[in-house]
Amino acid sequence: MALDAVQHNLQRQLHYAEAWESTGKRLELALTAGNLAELGDSYAVACWNGVWLGVFEEARAIGRDGYQRLRVDAPLFAAHSLSWAALASFYLGDWDALLQEFELVVGALGERRAALTSGFSMPWPAVAFVREARGDRTGSDEILAEIYDVERARGVRASATLSALVVPTLLLRGEVEEARTRLELSFGGERPDNERPDNLPLLKLAEADVILAEGRGDTAELARELRELATETGAHYLGPTALRLEGRLIDAAEAYDAIGMTMYAAVARLDAVERGADPSQLEAALAPLERAGFRRELERLRRLQEDVARTDS
């Protein structure tokens, strides 16, 4: 319990690497402590910290292990653990796994799905994005409606935690103004004393998407902020995103690949080819986009392939 308090305060201070270390120690103890509730919470919190830090493969392995150990004797703890593992699957571009894990979470929650809390609803924004990306607007609408119900129950207009992927989903739907409004609310519009949200790095990842969607040219300042925040938090995905904002798209793609964010890497490669990079980058982008089933980006890839073929002929 003391280690839980340590990681909680470290996370609130945005010291993700140190919080991750604390969760590892806590889980190691909980595995032999004989307290099912502490074990369940230890698994979920460890996976949670791993996702925010950006060690997605390690986080997912922990979350899945927690689900397998707890699904019979403590199904709600199992659901909490797997909900964070599902979020890791999203960032890893393993969207089929995300959807499978989402169904397991829903099954473990049972009737509690009708009264979701933000802690258990982490896969919902990821599922909304994936359904939208795969051309299922109705399915995306249904999931977003559940997210908005969670926020209304909490008395907030925008949950910072859920907005990290609601914002990109809105962008994907072409709702850029709505995405910007939600982002600003999440950054501090409804927080006391302008306190920084615990998931600030993931919100900054969403802000980069918003700025690029708005077509703004003033990306250097945000890139600098991301590098400073990466040093402070240890969040692995901020460096690649800074490279993306600086227009160093192949470098960004390689950096995303290095931490397992293959879908993000693929999109950066398409952006690079649009700006005149070697068309061989399209081949590297194809498999991750097909694995994810990202319809819009696959269509963009094929248009770029056609453009290259016409140029060659």
Image (cartoon, rainbow, N blue to C red):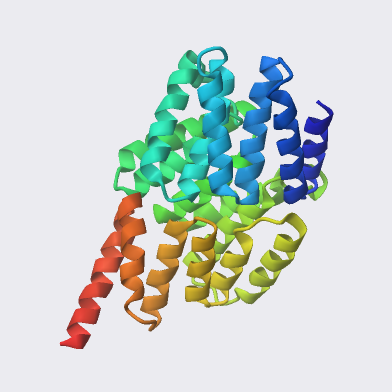
Residue 109 position within the rendered picture, expressed as x and y whole percent measured from the top left:
50, 19
Residue 33 appears in which quarter of the rendering?
A: top right
For the question of whether residue 250 can be seen, the reply is: yes
- Residue 292 coordinates in the image, percent (x, y): 35, 50
Q: Can residue 116 be seen in this snapshot?
A: no
User: Number of callouts in the render?
Assistant: 0
Residue farthest along the left direction in this orientation: 313
Q: Nearer the viewer, residue 94 or 171?
A: 94
Name above or below for residue 37 compared with residue 194: above
Rendered view: 68 above or below 196: above
Side (left or right) of 308 relative to 313: right
- Give the x, y percent position of residue 221: 67, 73
Vertical comparison of 224 with 291: above or below: below
Q: Nearer the viewer, residue 44 or 137?
A: 44
In the displayed structure image, the side of residue 313 where residue 101 appears, left or right:
right
Q: Is residue 156 left or right of residue 254?
A: right
Q: Residue at x 41, y 64 (%)?
A: 267
Kindly identify the residue that appears in the image at 67 percent across and 22 percent down: 39
Instruction: Quarter of the image for the C terminus: give it.
Output: bottom left
Give the quadrant of the N terminus.
top right
Q: Position of residue 20 (x, y in %)?
A: 71, 43
Residue visible at 55% across and 22% down in the picture? 69
Please indicate whether residue 148 sits to the left or right of residue 313 in the image: right
Residue situated furthest front in the rendering = 32
Q: Between residues 96 and 210, which one lies in front from this camera angle? A: 96
The answer to which image quadrant residue 40 occupies is top right
